[in-house]
Amino acid sequence: MAEEEELDRLREDFPSWHIWRSQVGRLWATRLGRAAWERPTDPDFAMTVDGDSARVLRAELTAQNDAFPERPLA
């Protein structure tokens, strides 16, 4: 799968994250919305994650979403 297709797939699979590739080719994702202000202080919570490949970034995003599921805003 082409790199841009991989990024598009990640964006489809993780719509609550802004996902991009840096100028040096590393992949990054940042949570959208007010997630950081609604979570208790937890050392495993990440507002931004990164990875060397789409596979690594997918694993990071999956781990974050599993540990900290999205809650609807009240």
Image (tube, helix red, strand yellow):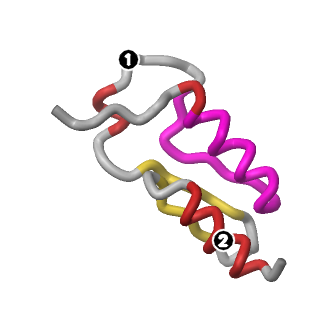
Residue 59: in magenta span: yes
Element carrying mark 2: helix
In the picture, measured across the screen, residue 37 lies left or right of residue 40, that is: left
In the picture, measured across the screen, residue 16 lies left or right of residue 48, that is: left
Question: How many numbered discs, if any?
Answer: 2
In the image, residue 58 sits, relative to residue 8, either above or below, namely above
Q: Of callouts 2 and 1, which one flags the residue occurring earlier in the amino acid sequence?
A: 2
Which residue is at 80% across, 82% downward?
A: 2
Which residue is at 70% across, 79% downward?
A: 5
Does any portion of residue 18 appear in the rendered image?
yes
Q: Residue lying farthest left? A: 74
The residue labelled by disc 2 is: 7
In the image, residue 16 sits, relative to residue 24, either above or below, namely above
Q: Amino acid at mark 1?
A: Pro
Does any portion of residue 21 appear in the rendered image?
no
Q: Amino acid at mark 2?
A: Leu
Element carrying mark 1: loop
In the picture, measured across the screen, residue 17 lies left or right of residue 73, that is: right
Residue nearest the observer in this picture, 48 or 6: 6
Q: Quadrant of the C terminus?
A: top left
x then y, percent, for residue 46: 54, 35
CA gap between label 2 and label 1 equals 30 Å
Look at the image and give the residue range highlighted in magenta.
Answer: 45-65
